[in-house]
Image: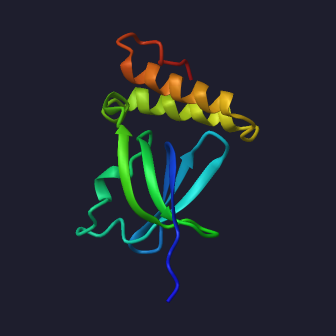
Amino acid sequence: MATIMTKEIIGLIIRVIDYKESSQIMHLLTDDKIESIMCRGIKKQTSKLKGYILSYNYVKCFVTDGKMPILTDILVIDSYNNIQNNVNKFKYAGLLINMLYKERYENNKVYSLALKSIKFINDSNEEYYYMNQ
């Protein structure tokens, strides 16, 4: 009987895409690349992981080791609730992440800058994050 190998991936959830009826694909920004992780059954009412798969959550994911990692468990390290609860901060965080990674992921300095920026946006009481459109 084959054993399933698992690994841990730590990163920032930057996007969640619906996949089929009850699953989603999570894009996780890590220190060396953007990782795509299959979240099977996550949209079901009975899913124990349902509330943790949110954009801009900083998480530790436990996944199967394979071509497309499959989420088996997740631990939220930081939820950045102020971004989740403020549409302007959420929008600005998305614009920032898109700008940082438009040219492709190159090194962990960009990852570090993204994490610091998300933390700043979350913790800021000022209106720095408003942009003229």
Whether residue 81 sits left or right of residue 13 in the image: it is left
Q: Where is residue 42 in the image (x, y as percent from the top left)?
A: 36, 65
Q: Eyeballing the image, is 20 above or below 103? A: below
Compared with residue 47, is residue 11 higher up or lower down, i.e. above or below? above
Question: On the image, which quarter does residue 81 sit in?
Answer: top left
Q: In which quarter of the image is residue 66?
A: bottom right
Q: Tag count in the figure? A: 0
Instruction: Using the image as rendered, state which of residue 3 and residue 8 is in the foreground.
Output: 3
Q: Residue at x 24, y 68 (%)?
A: 45
In depth, the one of 128 and 66 nearer the eye is: 66
Colour scheme used in the picture? rainbow
Residue placed most toward the observer, 17 or 120: 120
Q: Where is residue 31 in the image (x, y as percent from the top left)?
A: 62, 39
Judge whether 92 appears above or below 18 on screen: above
Horizontal side, residue 81 vs residue 10: left or right: left
Give the x, y percent position of residue 111. 61, 33
Residue 68 location in percent, x, y?
60, 68
At horizontal 50% and vertical 75% (from top left) the residue drawn is 4
Residue at 67% from the left image edge and 33% from the top image edge: 108
